[in-house]
């Protein structure tokens, strides 16, 4: 078995924290290509270093929901941003609106830290200039 290097250990730590991170996200974090990360993960699985992926249950409370108010960067539009949002399973709804805000995005997360990570990921999307986060405290009516 090949000895684990610092990159292997970083990948393992990232996956232990959130096994749902995409290969692209992992690659960006550790500074490798997507295919190099896929090969490393396959090797870690084949050698038994990664034995399984599992679910860690949280407090059992309701998931956190928040509205993200997005403003596009100059020269960008809904068509540029939507494919990036559609790729995120935490995104529940997207509404194009008029005014200072360009889009309302309803997201759901299991913990405040996950909401923060999601918000930061969306803020880093190409074409996004600003994100305002409005956490939902209580739903009074939903039809």
Image (cartoon, rainbow, N blue to C red):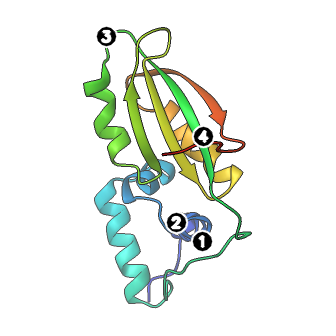
Q: Residues within 10 Å of mark 4 (few under 14, many from 20)?
A: many
The residue carrying mark 4 is 66
**Image: 48 above or below 107:** below
Question: Residue 98: which disc?
Answer: none
Q: Position of residue 41 (x, y in %)?
A: 40, 73
Residue under label 2, please give it. Answer: 11
* Pointer 4 with pointer 3, Cβ within 8 A: no
Residue occupied by mark 1: 16
- Residue 140 location, quadrant: top right
| Of pointers 2 and 4, the one earlier in the residue sequence | 2
First in sequence: mark 1 vs mark 3: 1
**Number of callouts:** 4
Toward which corner of the image does residue 2 lie, by quadrant?
bottom left
Say which label, 2 or 3, has the lower sequence index: 2
Q: Residue at x 45, y 56 (%)?
A: 26
Q: Position of residue 78 (x, y in %)?
A: 31, 24
Pointers 2 and 4 in contact (C-beta within 8 Å) = no
Q: Quadrant of the N terminus?
A: bottom left
The mark closer to the camera, 2 or 1, is 1
């Amino acid at each position: 078995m090949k000895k684990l290097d610092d990159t292997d250990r970083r990948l393992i730590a990232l996956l232990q924290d959130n096994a749902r991170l995409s290969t692209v996200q992992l690659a960006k974090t550790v500074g490798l290509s997507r295919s190099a990360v896929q090969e490393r993960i396959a090797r870690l699985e084949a050698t038994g270093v990664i034995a399984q992926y599992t679910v860690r249950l949280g407090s059992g409370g309701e998931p956190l929901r928040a509205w993200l108010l997005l403003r596009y960067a100059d020269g960008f539009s809904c068509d540029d941003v939507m494919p990036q949002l559609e790729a995120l399973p935490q995104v529940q709804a997207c509404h194009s609106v008029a005014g200072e805000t360009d889009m309302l995005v309803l997201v759901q997360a299991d913990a405040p830290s996950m909401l923060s990570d999601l918000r930061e990921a969306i803020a880093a999307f190409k074409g996004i200039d600003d994100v305002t986060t409005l956490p939902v405290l209580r739903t009074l009516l939903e039809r």
